Structures are given as C-alpha cells and as structure tokens.
Amino acid sequence: MFGFLTPQAKPKDPLDPLHSRKSASEWFQHLPALDVIGRQAHVIHAFEAMRHASRAMDVDRIAAIEYLDAALDVDHRRLIKWYFENLQGSPKLADRFWQAASEVCQSFMVAYHTALEEALAHPNDRKWKASVPLVVARLIYFHGIDAKLRLFRNERWAPAKWTQLHQLFLRATELGIERLPLALEDADPLAPRMCIEQEYVYVLLILLLNTGNLTPAELDWVCAQFRAWGRDLALDAVLPPTPGGFFVDLAGSAGLRRRSGKDQGAQVGYLDTAPLAEKLEHAIAAMRDPEEGVEAAANPLFQSRIAILEKVRPTVSPSRDAELRRHPRVAVDITANVTVGLSHITHDLAPNVPHAATEEVAANQLPPGGTGQHPATTAASKASAVPRTRQFGATARGSMLRHNEGHAAQELNHARIEANAKAIAKAMESAEEIELHPVTPDAQFRDPPAGTGQTPPAPAPVPDSALWRVKDRSVAGWRISAPGGVGQSLALGALVAMRPAESGDWMLGVVRRLHKESTSQLEAGMSLIAERVVAVTLHGRRHATEDMGIVVDGIDASTIGARFEGIYLMPPARLDTRLAMRTLVIPASEYFEGRSLILTTARSNYAVTLRSVVDQRADWSWVTIHVSGRGPRTDS
C-alpha cells in the first residue's frame, strides 16, 4: 500500500554491463576465460558503447569501472609477457599484444577522465567527494602504463601529456587528497597502498628512464623495482638545503630535470632521489656478494640485473660529477649507407661481380701453377665453342638454353665467392694466422686491356631514401639519424653495418641507444666494433670418410658440411697483426665452443676453431677463432 514510499531501484539495461558493480561482475564472468585478446576487445567495446550512448556517469558506474580495472590486471601482465616473448621471433605478433595493452589502457583513461569530470561537478555531494581520490590515483596510474608502453618503443611523451599529468596532481593538492593511502576494492589487502603523490612520482621516474639503452624487458623490471623503492620519495615545495636532485615545473610541459642552480618555473616541486639511489646501491652490492645459501654471484641472472642497474644508476643519482662519455664527440652531417641484420649485411657486403667480369675475376684467383682458368670457366668456354643449334632440335635447344642459364648462374655465384675470398687473400708468413687485408670497394674491377675501349663499370647509385645521416662520431662510435619512416624496426643490440658516403670501407657496430624523436624520425647511438669488415663464407667440418674421399681444391669433400655466411672483423691497422685477436660474427644458431669450420681464401684453405664469445644476441654471435691448420688450394 505504501510501496511508493520505498526508494525504487533504477531500471537495469541488459545492454549496459557497466550499470553497476554487480552487473559488471556477472557480465565479465561470462566472457571467454582463455581468450585474453577477446576479453580485452569486449571491455573496450563496452566502454565505447557507454560513451556513444551518452549514458549518465554515477557512483555505481564508477564502481563497475573499478571492478573491471582490478579484474583486468592479470590480463595486462599476460599481454606484456607475451609481448616480450615474441619481440624477437614474431615482431608482428608482439605488436598485436602491445596494441591490445595500449588500447585497453586508453579506454580506462577516457573512462576515468569522464568520471573525474562528473565527480568534480558535484563538490558538495559526499558520495561523489569520496570517489574522487581513487579516480585521480587510477587515472595517474594509467598515465604511467601509457608512459611505460611508449618507452618499450623508445617513444617520447608529447608535451600535452605532461600538461595533463601535472594538472591532475595540482588538482589533487588543491583538494588536499594527494597523500591519502588508496587501493582498489578487490586489491590484495596485504599489498602496500599507494597515494596520489606516489603514483605521480612513479610516473616521473618512469619517464626519467628514457635513456634509449634498455630493452623492453629490462625497462619493465626496472620499473617494478622503482615502484617498490620509490615509496619514500615525495615532492617538496621548498628548495632543499643540499645540492643535487631533480625538480619539475608543475605548470610546464616537461618532466623531471636535474637541478642546475637556476631552477625556474611558475610552480616548482623538488625531488631528492637519494633514498632511491641508496636502495639501488644496496641491491647491486647484495647481488655481487650474496648471502650464504644464495646462488653464487656468477649467476647470469645476477650479472644481467647488475648490468641493468649500472645503466640506470647515473640517471637517478642525485648528483652527476663525472662525464659519462669517455671520448669526445665531433659533430658531423654526412650521408651514409646503413644495413641492419647479419643476413642483410653479408648480402650487401658481398662484391657485386657483373657477369661480364666473372671469367676475369675467377681466372685471377687460381693458385700458382694452375691452368690459368677456373674449372667452371673452362667448362663454360668449351661448351660455348660447340654450335649447339646444329646438333639438337628445337626441344633439346630449349633444354640446353635452360642448362646454360643455370650453369651461368653457378659460374656467377662461384665468382662472387672467389671475389669475397680475394678480399682476404694476401699471404702472410705465419701458418697460424689468416691473411686478411682491406680491399677497396672497386678492387674487383680490373683495368681493361689497352685498346679494348672498355671502361670499368661505375658503382650503382644509391637512392636518397636509403641513405641515413651521421650526426656525430667519436673513437668509440657514431650517432645516426634515419629519415622519415626508415629504420623504425631498429632495436637495441641489432648488428649494423655503416659506410659513410665519403668513405669506401664498411664499419660494423651494435645499437646501444635508441630514441624516436617522432613517428617519422629515429636516432640511434652505435658502438663501433670494427672499422673494416669482410663478408666470408664458411663450411662446417665433418670427420673424413675413407671410402668417400674426393679432393676438391685441396679439401676432402667428405669433410665439408653445411655452408653459412659470416663476417670477418679485420684487426686495426695500428695493431701488430701477429698479435691481434681474430674474430668472426656468425649466426647465433651456428655457434658452439670448439666447433671446427673451413674458411677458404683464394690461395689457402683454413681449418678454424670457434673459441669464446665476445658478444652475443638472439640472432648473432661475435666469437674469437683459432687457426688450427692451413693447406694450399689445388685443382681437382
């Protein structure tokens, strides 16, 4: 009878899963349990439907958003883990996982921003007022997620993102809620509660790690450590009495900057990172000298994490007294050809011998006392001396033409191998050293005989779109800049060959730093590992079999295994070649210590043994070699 006096519940829209916390829970439990990407897509669609339908934001809807926030935390960690696992082997799949994590992050940012605007529009309502601190904290938290995802790709934050972050923290300080301990309702009750100021400082520290020398997995691990170690940090509005540290202009559009004595800004906050640096030092010391019962300090995991912390130590140190760059840099602005990846480098460094020059190049690579012609060339000459059109019909003629083409391709391939060998073919006295000397790019083209009227072929022009620019260089490396869209797949640890337009020598380096200034501009810091390199062909070595021994060029063919390409790093000219360490860069899958290989030059065959690793990545290994034998090449 008096039912009209009882408050009536709002009608539930079956198409609106974000109507309340209960409806969100029931809807989420019916989503596919094993399809993480599909579950993320359903949540994003629900946020878009809420926005397009202009559904009113209320406290119950905020509770539903917070429930999904907590429920998707595990999914987010899975996406990041899968992104790391597929980054090397399947870049496209890794990019899909990154996109899924980024899209759901943007959806939560939009939802929380809408909720904050609605909450601030009701300043006197106690329910709305109670929801503001957590909404601001989670909004800043997702700014941190966005910052970390962009760092994975070496991307910088736009100034507008900085302004938005600073405004959120300023609004929290105006309301006096920046230091309230907060946590989602479904969070672990034993987990520490983060306040708005701690979330804000954490984002500042994340973006301080934009050094360009950390891989995504390393960045993620460092961020987790900083989140735990940085809970004691706080912004101070008063200038600290001690020098050093950082400051941030809350009215500006930039992040933390190191104090220089002229800290200017409309609203400046000071941050002393000494507590964070102290915990970092303690962590390094603990891994270098572990306690009893803990694995030895030689543990590769400890060593890799120490190396990571060593990289970030100068970044967060309150003071920086020493200059990190050991060698002075000289600013330059020259174009250069750049090749990335071992397979591409070996292909581009291989001499491009034209078919017309094949016979001449091959003939000049024979050892003394030979016939003066390469066997393949001799066979080709004899074959061409017979008028095939007079001996066979049309069908046979077509077959022989195809055979001729195949034979010519084999001849060209052999000539290229011989030209590669020529680059390392000047003999030395010691039988324990490989004869290796530089060769100019056009050395494979000889002056034509007098009176022939022929001229050496000119190098093919390189299109401007393929040229990079060298910005500065030093004894230890160089900094290169890619034009719009070029080199966007470059990654830390990538092997890179670079040849300045003004020089004829290819130099080999490794990417140590990477920065994306914009979507169309990339800069990379390269560490030089060799000033001159030569592409070589190697063969695995097998045990000889007595019943199948066939000698070709002085080598028992039964001992020759699979062929693969590599790069020989020429010792610097300033070193004594007899004392210089011999090294090769080969595919990582082809390396194991003690493996025997055959390296062939124009005059000799070498039995080399792979030794220790100098440096190694997922796709290449830089290894030392020992020459265990040498024999002259002979005609078969």
Image: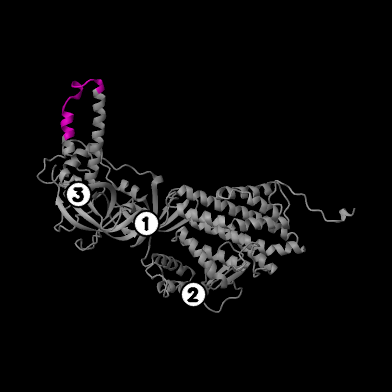
Q: Is residue 149 visible?
A: yes
Q: CA distance from mark 2 to mark 3?
A: 56 Å
Nearer-N-terminus badge (2/3): 2
In the figure, residue 396 lies in which quadrant?
top left
Magenta residue span: 379-395
**Dominant secondary structure (helix, strand or loop) of the stretch shown in magenta:** helix
Q: To which residue does mark 2 refer?
A: 278
Question: For this view, does 241 lie left or right of residue 174?
Answer: left
Q: CA distance from mark 1 to mark 2?
A: 32 Å
As drawn, which residue projects farthest toward the bottom?
A: 241
Q: To which residue does mark 3 refer?
A: 601
| Position in image of residue 116 (x %, y %) | 69, 59
Secondary element under disc 3, as helix, strand or loop, is loop
In the image, residue 386 lies in the stretch drawn in magenta? yes
Nearer-N-terminus badge (1/3): 3
| Position in image of residue 66 (x %, y %) | 65, 58
Q: To which residue does mark 1 refer?
A: 617
The amino acid on which the numbered mark 3 sits, given as a three-letter code, is Thr
- Label for residue 492? none
Decide: is 113 above or below 243. above
- Total numbered badges shown on the rendered structure: 3
Residue at x 77%, y 49% (from the top left corner): 11
- In depth, the one of 440 and 64 nearer the eye is 64
